[in-house]
Image (cartoon, rainbow, N blue to C red):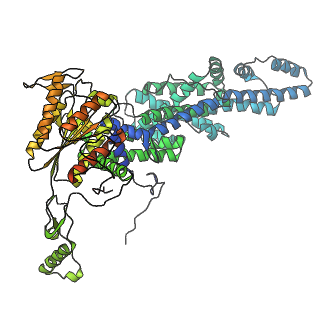
Amino acid sequence: MSRRDSRYGRYAGGDPLAPPVDLAEALDAIGEDVMAGYSPERAMAEVLRRGTQGQRGLDDLARQVAQRRQDLLRRHDLDGTMREVRELLDHAVLEERKQLARDLDDDARFAEMRIESLPSSPAAAVSELGDYAWRSPQAREDFERIKDLLGREMLDQRFAGMKQALENATEQDREAVAEMLTDLNALLDAHRRGEDTEQQFREFMDKHGEFFPEDPQDVDELIDALAARSAAAQRMLNSMTPEQREELMALSASAFGSPALQEALGQLDANLQALRPGEDWDGAEQFGGDQGLGLGDGTGVLQELADLDALGEQLSQAYPGARMSDIDLNKLERHLGQDAAVDARTLTDLERALRDSGALKRGTDGTLRLSPKAIRQLGRSLLRDVAQRMSGRQGARDVRRAGAAGEMSGATREWEYGDTEPWDVTRTITNAVVRTVSAGDDARNGVRLDIRDVEVSETEARTQAAVALLVDTSFSMAMDGRWVPMKRTALALHTLIQSRFRGDHLQLIGFGPYAEVMDIDELTALDAKWAKGTNLHHALLLARRHFRKHPNAQPVLLIVTDGEPTSHLEADGQLFFTYPPSPRTVAFTVKALDDVGRFGAQTTFFRLGEDPGLARFIEQMARRVDGRVVAPELEDLGVAVVDSYLGSRSGSSSYDNGSAYGGSYGGWFGGRGFWVDE
């Protein structure tokens, strides 16, 4: 039996027990934004930005990034190294004074005079004491620690962790660092000249790899890591006051007791700046805290600030071609913690799932639209909302029967595509058993259902309906906040008919200056445009044509509008517009309604707004065709339209707001319930 080595490491895929992303909620939110006029891409971006229920969005993560950045600037200042130098210098001078006070020779008095006349600048004082013969062993040790500190801090600026690594370094360790810098500059010089440095890089890493825990795999990775750190060190210098910067540059010459380190690091910075000019070498930050940072730690903070800036840009997703996969999850976890990384990973999974789910499709004009699958999902959600609102009304009752079927006739027949009648279970199972035995198998071992086995119960023929939903698409609908409720209503009705009354024929007609027949995806994606005119006349002409195509179906006319008709089509097809409404436009509209009324269409007007002129006009129009007027609140528009449609199929309606013609309507549902599958 062969053995296979197993390697274990930290799981990097987030919480393995976390529930899958909730596409349904995200699709609902995207659909709502699309109906409000957003492009699908922008709608998806808005969902990711806001987040979903129980899931933080990009805005929350970006706020956390900004807060972290602000905390760093408020907490720290850049005087840490200078403070440490001052403390060591003050302690060295104090110990030397104590020793000199005990010494009684003349040289001690001259030394005291030199100590007392030291300049106030720490850099100048350190330079002045460079050749001083210390009498106190403790003072000498403190002064040497200053030079050692400066060397380690300067190295720590370019190589993270070097300050701690060289804390108790020997002369041999320092020589190894100097040799590494010499070889590194030689490697970078060769790379700048365009030479093939692959072999040189491998030899360099074999010799000095201990200085680079990042384990770069090629010279470019090495340069990237070094340049990011070096640029942060330069930004730290830029962020200092001129006095701090001058002091530090003067002290640098004393690092490790020799200017050689400063020269090598200067050459390194020049090489890196030439190789990576795109790094931010000129930036600066304004620190306002009191927690001093040394050169190495300060450089680390400047690097963290740069990382936070990059994360902020990634989380904004505001640049062209932005994708959630751009977010550096490792940096996010390093700076904000695991929870933030898990949230970002979940949002990334959500974006990927939305794109892979087929929720968006690209139309013939190249624009993205909601796919039929997404529209069905949104429609089901809207229909559930309508059903809940209807069942929540006073006197409501939930009648769980699908409205597509009539009364059972007692006969059965083979199932055909599109059938919504219930299965005859007994006949279906019997067919499966007979087929299994006929094939020579033993039915006692179980049977498998085949689509050929299924039989459905026949029902008595029911009346089909030809439904024309006329929706006002004039600018006033969008201006007064009725645009989205109108679209929600159309989509809910479309979903109901497609899922429960498939034999009915629905036509969606939008009317602004002109009227046009629209597919549901066109209406859903329709953006509000400034266009004068409410051409109900043209919409009624299209509705009449729809009814003519279905002479054996019950015509149902549903009209949603918030304004009187202000335009109509002349006999030659030319558009006529005037405001206030012209008697000629009213006459054309009334005649078109009378023509539709001759088909026996059950007509309902849904009046939006409180315009008295519109109310009078609608009431008079409804009387002419024995129709109804409903003036619902915007949030109840979908309920009113769906209920009116259901009422037209059963001969009654239950929606009543006190403005109905053609009978009294009381008792929600009136026995005509429907239910929506989850």
For the C terminus, the quadrant is bottom left
**Residue 54 spot, x, y in % from top left:** 47, 48
- Residue pictured at 20% horizontal, 53% vertical: 501
Q: Nearer the viewer, residue 240 or 289?
A: 289
- Residue pictured at 9% horizontal, 50% vertical: 552
Q: Is residue 493 left or right of residue 437?
A: right
Q: Nearer the viewer, residue 36 or 188?
A: 36
For the N terminus, the quadrant is bottom left
**Residue 77 spot, x, y in % from top left:** 64, 28
- Residue pictured at 34% horizontal, 35% vertical: 42
From this view, report whether residue 145 is shown above or below residue 583: below
Q: Is residue 593 left or right of residue 669?
A: left
From this view, report whether residue 162 is shown above or below residue 671: above
Location of residue 67 by image quarter: top right
**Residue 208 spot, x, y in % from top left:** 52, 40
| Residue 515 visible to an observer of this rendering | yes
Q: Nearer the viewer, residue 383 or 311?
A: 383
- Residue pictured at 13% horizontal, 39% vertical: 596
Location of residue 570 by image quarter: top left
**Residue 58 spot, x, y in % from top left:** 44, 39
From this view, report whether residue 368 is shown above or below residue 354: above
Q: Nearer the viewer, residue 189 or 165?
A: 165
Q: Is residue 517 left or right of residue 401?
A: left
